[in-house]
Amino acid sequence: MHFPVAGIDLNPLIPPAVAFAISFFTSMGGVSGAFLLLPFQVSVLGFDSPAVSATNHLFNVVAIPGGVWRYSREGRMVWPLTWIIIIGTLPGVLVGALLRVHVLTDPRDFKVFVGVVLLYLGGKLALDLVGKRGADRGQAIAEEQFHRAIGSKGRPAPCASPRVVVRRFDAFRLVYEFCDQTFDLRVPRLMLLSLAVGVIGGIYGIGGGAIIAPFLVTFFGIPVYVAAGAALMGTLVTSAAGVAFFQLLARSHEGVAVSPDWVLGLLFGIGGMAGMYFGARLQKYVPARAVKAVLTACILALAVSYIGAFSR
C-alpha cells in the first residue's frame, strides 16, 4: 500500500501491529508510545519530513482514548492535574510546531535534537530506578499499598480505597489522597514544567507526555498508578491541537510535507488504541519499577543511536 504524504510503500498490517506492541507497554507508565514510534518512522520507514511530527500527533489522538477511559473507570484520574498539564503544554506545543517547521527541517539536525531529549529523559528515569529519596516515601508506600489492595482477593485491603480523592485545588496547590497517602503539589511549578515540556513535545510530535510522565513520577513524587492517566489525557488534548496547527501550516508551506499522513496515522492509532486499553487494564498488576526499567533501556538505546549516527 502506498502512503503519499510519507512517500513510502508498506504492508497496511505493519503500522497497527507495531503501534500495539509499543503502546501496550508504554501506556502503563503514562506514555502513548509516540516517542518510540517516531524513530521507527524516521529510521525504518524513511519518513523524515516535518509531516512525521503531525502524523505522530494524529496517532496520539486516535490511540489515547482507550487508555484514558480505562484509567478513569478505575478511579485513578487526577482531573485537576490533567487540567494543569493541558493549560501548560498547549501553548508550548504550538510554539514547538513552529520551530519544527521553520528551524528543525533538516532530518539530520532533527535526529540530534531527538537524541538529546531521549538521553535526558532516559537519565532521569535511570536515576529514579537507582533508589528512592526521602521525599518519595509517600509515593512508594502508596504504590505498595495499591499493589497489595489489588491482590487482596477478599482479605482485608491495606488501604481504605485504591481510588483518587481530591481534597484541595486552587491556583497555588493541588492536594489529593491515594491509598491513605496525602500528596501536596505546587501548581505554579507544575505549570512551568508543562510549558517547557510542551515546546519540546511540539517539536518531537509527541504532545509532551513521554517527557512529563517521568517528571511527575521522579520530581513530584506522584505514584505511577496515578500519573499515567493524567499524562495520557494531557497528551491527547495537546496532540489534537498539534494536528490542527500542522494542518493550518500546510496551507502556507506548499511543496513541503507538513500535514499528517492521515491513513498512516489512523492505522498506527488503531493499533495503539488497542495496546493502550490492554496496557492500562493490566498496569495495576505490573510493578512500577519493571515498567520503568523497560522504558529506560529503550530510551537510552535510541538516544545513543541517534547521537552516534550524527557524529559519524
Image: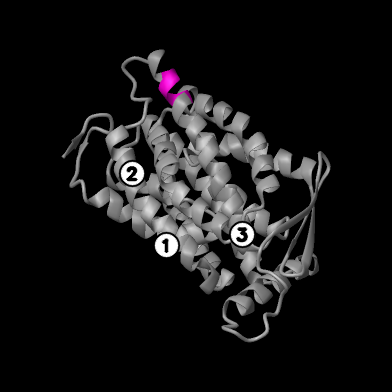
Q: CA distance from mark 2 to mark 3?
A: 35 Å
Residue stretch rendered in magenta on the structure = 245-249
Label 3 CA crowd tier, 10 Å (few <14, some 14–19, many 20+): some
Q: Nearer the viewer, residue 132 or 120?
A: 132
Q: Main secondary structure of the magenta part?
A: helix
- Disc nearest the viewer among 3 and 1: 3
Q: Can residue 109 be seen at all in this image of the molecule?
A: yes
- Give, as a three-letter code, the residue at label 3: Gly
Residue at image mark 1: 278
**Residue 307 visible in image:** no
Vertical position of residue 29 compared to residue 203: above or below = below
| Residue 247 is a magenta residue | yes
Tell me where residue 116 appears, x and y as whole percent: 54, 46
Count of labels shown?
Answer: 3
Asked if the residue under mark 3 is in contact with the one under mark 2, i.e. CB atoms within 8 Å, the reply is no
Furthest-right residue in this view: 172
N-terminal label among 2 and 3: 2
In screen coordinates, is 75 left or right of 57? right
Task: Write the residue at 78% across / 44% down.
Answer: 187
Q: Which residue is mark 2?
A: 41
Give the percent coordinates (x, y) of residue 108.
40, 36
Q: Which marked residue is nearer to the observer: mark 2 or mark 3?
A: 3
- Look at mark 3 in the image and give the residue it sits on: 75
Distance of label 2 from label 1 (alpha carbons): 24 Å
Where residue 2 appears, as percent x and y from the top left, is: 17, 36
Indicate the secondary structure of the residue bearing disc 3.
loop
Residue type at the position of mark 1 = Phe
The crowding category of the residue bearing disc 2, from other C-alpha atoms within 10 Å (few below 14, some 14 to 19, many at least 20), is: some
> The N terminus is located in which quarter?
top left
- Closer to the camera, 1 or 168? 168
